Image (tube, rainbow, N blue to C red):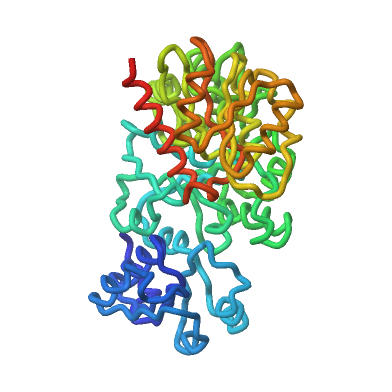
Amino acid sequence: MKPFPHVNKKQVLVLGLAKSGMAAALALHKLGAIVTVNDGKPRAESKEVDALEEKGIEVVCGGHPLHLLDTTSLIIKNPGIPYSNLLIAEAMNRNIPIWTEVELAYRIAEADIVAITGSNGKTTTTTLVHAMLEHSEKAPLIAGNIGTVATSVALEATKENVMVLELSSFQLMGTEQFKPKVAVWLNLFDAHLDYHGSKDLYIEAKAKVYENMTIEDHLVYSADDPIVAKHVQQSKATLVPFSTKVELPTGAYLKDNAIYFREERICPIDEIVLPGAHNVENMLASVAAAKLAGGTTAQIKTVLTTFTGVKHRLQFVGEVHGRKVYNDSKATNILATQAALASFNQDVVLLAGGLDRGNEFDELIPSLTHVKTLVVFGETKMKLTALGNELGIKVVQAIDVQDAAKKAFEHSKIGDIVLLSPACASWDQYSTFEERGDAFLAAVTQLTNCH
């Protein structure tokens, strides 16, 4: 950890508890700041309060009183709290700096940083890069939006490490001096516009990943995404493109059915186990980032030929009774399910359904070519049933995802793909997509043990 006198004996307000707020508060306290934590939930719903108060950190719960700003010199904001929040809006009026904890992590980290952002594919790419950097000169540490708070990792990181960070637009929007050695911008789709207010502001937030980079740093970007390719031209970093469509000698690309980086053949495509065209893009970006951060070709190839996916994200569960089973519970919208279905040419038994947000599923129709059976559940069960009937696809109704898993095996045969890719959020029956995916995995395990 680097010393950070900027906060020593200064009043710092941490807005929002959860994991990032807790980590920021403890780090600031260790750095000598006078820390106050403010959370809108009642004290009884904030289990972290007692642990913070035991360390002498003041905690204010149940609202966001404006008087907290009177002595505050810096705010560390939970990424999910919008800038329309009254306390944040007033802090902006008073010109009080507002950071997310990613900025704090950068200020105290001794390690170099590889930062990965994009609308889709961040978690898979971050996981790949982290694995590819094993056995390199600097030991990799993984953090950020992937689940481990960046500040907690930064406290322990040394110059012998490299931090691999997954970063959302929410996190990047609250940075000032943040400057990774290697940055990756995967793609850009319309997302989180309710938070940012417009697509331009969303792009502006994403672009902060390279805002402070110099020619000594490397920016990996999708040459196939016209918006990303256009905006990175503003960067002062050394640009490193990746593409599935054209050969790019300065970046990562496909040639002769293999992945190349700067004219070095890395790995044949047919040796890669993770399915999906979108995952080829993630792999190209990962190869470029890992090579630039010191990864060895041998380790990179090992990862490409063994990596079966991130849990709940087109995760290959295994072959069960002759069926290849995939858990894509993270597919909470139609676009994600389209991408999953595009990964297969075999017959698919698709498990789909969940929260009814009022939309229809007509956009899914072109992707259902290989779907032989729809196993449907949740609030959208009847909409998906009507869609299947309209297309002449066999439809089986289930109570929940566990029941759907059982029925999927009953209505499939050896050689089929059994794919959970719901195209809906989970909140009608499960609190998170992870809970839904875990229920599916538990059901598959039970079926595996049945002979």
Q: Quadrant of residue 294?
A: top left
Work out whether 191 lies above or below 292.
below
- Residue 119: % across, % down: 61, 45
The x, y position of residue 51, in whole percent, is 26, 70
Q: The N terminus lies in which quarter of the figure? A: bottom left
In the rendered image, the quadrant that contains the C terminus is: top left
Residue at 68 percent across and 21 percent down: it is 393
* Residue ID at (47%, 15%): 323
Of 64 and 284, the residue lying toward us: 64
Residue lying farthest to the left in this orientation: 54
Task: Name the spot of residue 343 as percent of width and height, x first.
Answer: 60, 23
Q: Is residue 279 left or right of residue 311?
A: right
Q: Is residue 235 visible?
A: yes
Seen from the viewer's position, the closer of residues 319 and 412 is 412
In this view, 25 is above or below 132:
below
Residue 251 in view in this figure = no
Between residue 218 and residue 65, name the one nearer to us.
Answer: 65
Q: Position of residue 198 (x, y in %)?
A: 73, 59
Q: Write the residue at 61% across / 11% down.
A: 256
Residue under the point 48% across and 80% down: 63
The answer to whether residue 120 is above or below residue 212 is: above
Is 202 situated left or right of 282 in this image? Answer: right
Indicate the quadrant where residue 106 lies: bottom left
**Relative to residue 44, is residue 351 drawn left or right?**
right
